Image (cartoon, helix red, strand yellow):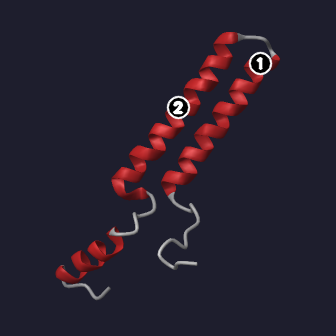
């Protein structure tokens, strides 16, 4: 097992995406139970929004770094004069 990714999805981007997607499933389920198509489609929309928000947050640096980027962030920190 690699120590490069030991966060197991414990990032703000992952948590936000999961919470929004779970809310979307809840709303969609209520739409099916209540037989209300608009509520169902609102739930589907929330699922899509959750995926997009998670990806945007990851691209903003709030998610796990790709495998090759940890060396770059260490080099950047070292160039800035901090001891990483």
Quarter of the picture containing the C terminus is bottom left
Residue occupying image coordinates x 34% and y 52%: 60
Image position, residue 65 (x, y; %) = 40, 64
Label tally: 2
Left or right: residue 24 compared with residue 2: right
Quadrant position of residue 38: top right
Residue occupying image coordinates x 67% and y 18%: 40
Quadrant position of residue 69: bottom left
Image position, residue 79 (x, y; %) = 17, 81
Quarter of the picture containing the N terminus is bottom right
Quadrant position of residue 83: bottom left
Asked which secondary structure carries label 1, the reply is helix
Which residue ends up furthest to the right in the rendered image? 33
Do the CB atoms of the residues marked 2 and 1 lie less than 8 Å apart? no
- The tag on residue 65 is none
Asked which secondary structure carries label 2, the reply is helix
Label 2 CA crowd tier, 10 Å (few <14, some 14–19, many 20+) = some
Which residue ends up furthest to the front in the rendered image? 1
Left or right: residue 82 compared with residue 44: left
Give the mark nearer the N terminus: 2 vs 1. 1
- Please determine whether, in this image, residue 19 is positioned above or below residue 23: below
- The tag on residue 48 is 2
- Quickly name the residue at label 1: 32
- Please determine whether, in this image, residue 37 is positioned above or below residue 27: above
Image position, residue 42 (x, y; %) = 60, 20
Label 1 CA crowd tier, 10 Å (few <14, some 14–19, many 20+) = some
Residue occupying image coordinates x 61% and y 38%: 21
Left or right: residue 81 compared with residue 66: left
Question: Distance between the Cα atoms at labels 2 and 1?
Answer: 18 Å
């Amino acid at each position: 097992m690699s120590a490069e990714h030991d966060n197991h999805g414990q990032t703000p981007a992952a948590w936000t995406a999961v919470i929004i997607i779970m809310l979307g499933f809840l709303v969609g389920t209520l739409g099916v139970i209540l037989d209300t198509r608009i509520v169902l489609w609102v739930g589907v929309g929330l699922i899509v929004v959750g995926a997009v928000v998670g990806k945007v947050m990851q691209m903003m640096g709030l998610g796990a770094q790709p495998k090759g980027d940890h060396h770059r962030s260490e080099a950047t920190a070292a160039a800035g004069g901090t001891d990483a």
